[in-house]
Amino acid sequence: MAEQTEKINVTIDGKTIAVDPGTTILNAARIIGGDVVPPAMCYYSSLKGSGGKCRTCLVEVSKGSEKDPRPMPKLVASCSTPVMDGMEVKNKTSERVNDARHGVVEFLLINHPLDCPICDQAGECHLQDLAFEHGLEKTRYEFKRRTFDKIDIGEYIKLHMTRCILCYRCVYTADQLTNQREHGVMKRGDAAEISTYIQNALDNDFIGNVIDVCPVGALTDKTFRFRSRVWYTKPMDAHRDCKKCSGKAVAWMIGDEIARITARKDQFGEVKEFICNECRFDKKEKTDWVIEGPRHIDRHSVISANKYEDPIPEHTPLLNKA
Ligand code: SF4
Ligand code: FES
């Protein structure tokens, strides 16, 4: 019989939970759920090596552990710091964290354009949500911003490098999900950029997933670009028989037409079952899919607006009966 490991206790924003040793503060917070969960722009639970780059998940450790109760002097990245028994952590309840998050958002926005009104990611963008909660009204940055031409990488994906926050998620996705990675982060420091060796070479069966893992609008789906604001679409769980992937997806519909296909994301914006390019880009007819029913959007963002899973429940009286 497998040996049972003893759980350890961690308290985050006053809520205590017992978790397995080795669990990170971020994952312990995700088990508790709700407000205590720090935002995460670069960590992605299914991608090995992700995390530790964006600093949005910083938290304050006000008590190190039962054995050594001293607080940690600096804020720590919750996505890569394991919990200790008796550890006490502050996220929402810490002024220091709040201040630091303001700074991180200001830093991320130094080069990121505020082009939400024309960006396809608007409404489901993690940086937009963060800027809404922690952003300043205007930038203090006085230098020239980085500019790049938009690049077609492959037949279906458009790269807006100006929007990229260099989280590396797409690089890990290509590395770990496809059989040949052809893009990566070139150069270093403020010259760093996502690039391909040959511009049109992102070509393999699962590369479309880089669009879903990108937390901002840097990688967009060319089959959906500018077709609709995402909050006007109706997400439906859908599936089809597919030889390459699970075939489980979300069909984002406008009326009776499928406007785009994405993988299914959880409440932290993460995909657990990645889908193939054929399902994502080539199957846009309603007859290609078995539509299961409305998708529950469990996210605090504009994307949740206008999503009625049960628009007129039987027990609800109609307010404005004509
Ligand atoms: S393109 Fe998107 S996923 Fe890739 S590093 Fe930039 S922000 Fe991250
Ligand atoms: S999510 Fe932890 S550093 Fe980016």
Image: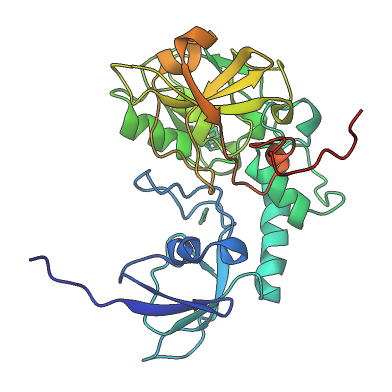
Image location (x, y in percent) of residue 235: 60, 28
Is 169 left or right of 120, judged from the image as shown? left
The answer to whether 145 is drawn above or below residue 82 in the figure is: above
Is 62 left or right of 119, judged from the image as shown? left
Is 112 left or right of 18, judged from the image as shown? right
Looking at the image, which residue is at 66% across and 17% down?
225
Closer to us: 1 or 282: 1
Closer to us: 272 or 45: 272
The answer to whether 97 is drawn above or below residue 132 in the figure is: below
Image location (x, y in percent) of residue 254: 68, 17
The answer to which quarter of the image holds residue 207 is top left
Q: How is the image coloured?
A: rainbow
Looking at the image, which residue is at 47% across and 29% down?
263
Closer to us: 95 or 138: 95
Image location (x, y in percent) of residue 112: 71, 38
Query: Do we see residue 202 in this rendering?
Result: no
Looking at the image, which residue is at 59% across and 62% down?
34
The answer to which quarter of the image holds residue 127 is top right
Query: Do we see residue 264 in this rendering?
Result: yes
Q: In which quadrant will I find the N terminus?
A: bottom left
| Number of marks in the rendered image | 0
The answer to whether 91 is drawn above or below residue 161 in the figure is: below
Image location (x, y in percent) of residue 223: 59, 12
Looking at the image, which residue is at 30% across and 19% down?
244
Q: In which quadrant will I find the C terminus?
A: top right
The answer to which quarter of the image holds residue 37 is bottom right
